[in-house]
Image (cartoon, grey):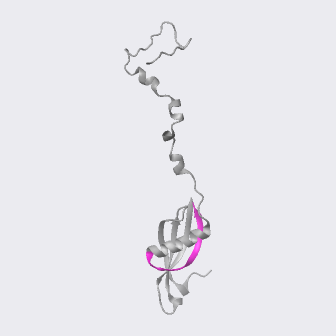
Amino acid sequence: MRTQRSRAGSRSAGEDRREPADDRYAEDDDRYTDDDYSDDESYEDESYDEEEEVEPIPAGQAARQALRQLSGLTGRDPSGVTSVQPNGNGWRVGVELVEDHRIPASTDLLGLYEVDLDADGEVLSFRRVRRYQRGKGEVG
C-alpha cells in the first residue's frame, strides 16, 4: 500500500495534487530513487575497470617476449633485439630476424621488425621496417 508523503509548505493551498487515478504513471515517478542503486553491486560502472591503467611488464621481459613471439609467428630464427621503448600502456620493440641463411653467415639476409606489445607482453601487431645484409648494416 502506498502512503502519501506530505511536504509542509512545498505546495500552495490551491495547487492540484496528482492522484494515482488522475495519472496512471504517478506511482512510477517515485518508485526509483538514487538510493535504490547505491547498494546494488551490479549497477557499478564497469567501464572504469577497463580503462584502469595497468603497469606494463619490465623492458627486459618485453624484449625477450617480443623476440620469442615474433620468431614463433614468422617461423624465422631470431638474431637479436635492437630497441625497446614505451608505447602507451605497452612496448614497441625492434627485433632482428634472419630471413635467409647464407654462407658465410656474415652475408645472411636480416629483417628488422617493430613489434607492439600490450602491458602483459602479448603481441598486438608487428611489421617489417627493412631488410638488409648482415655485413652491410647501418654504420654510424
Vertical side of 129 occupied by 88: above or below: above
Q: Give the residue displayed 51% in from the left and 89% down from the top.
A: 107
Task: Specify the segment rendered in magenta.
Answer: 74-87
Query: Could you tell me which residue is drawn at 60 percent across and 58 percent down?
Result: 55
In which quadrant of the rendered view does residue 9 lie?
top right
Magenta stretch containing residue 106, yes or no? no
Q: Residue at x 51, y 7 (%)?
A: 13
Q: Nearer the viewer, residue 16 or 38?
A: 38
Q: Position of residue 54 (x, y in %)?
A: 58, 56
Task: Point out residue 63 in the picture as x, y percentages from the top left corner.
Answer: 57, 71
Kindly identify the residue that appears in the image at 42 percent across and 21 percent down.
Answer: 27
Which quadrant of the figure contains the N terminus? top left
The number of numbered discs placed on residues in the rendered structure image is 0
Quadrant of the rendering where the C terminus is positioned: bottom right
Residue extending furthest toward the top: 14
Q: Is residue 113 left or right of residue 25?
A: right
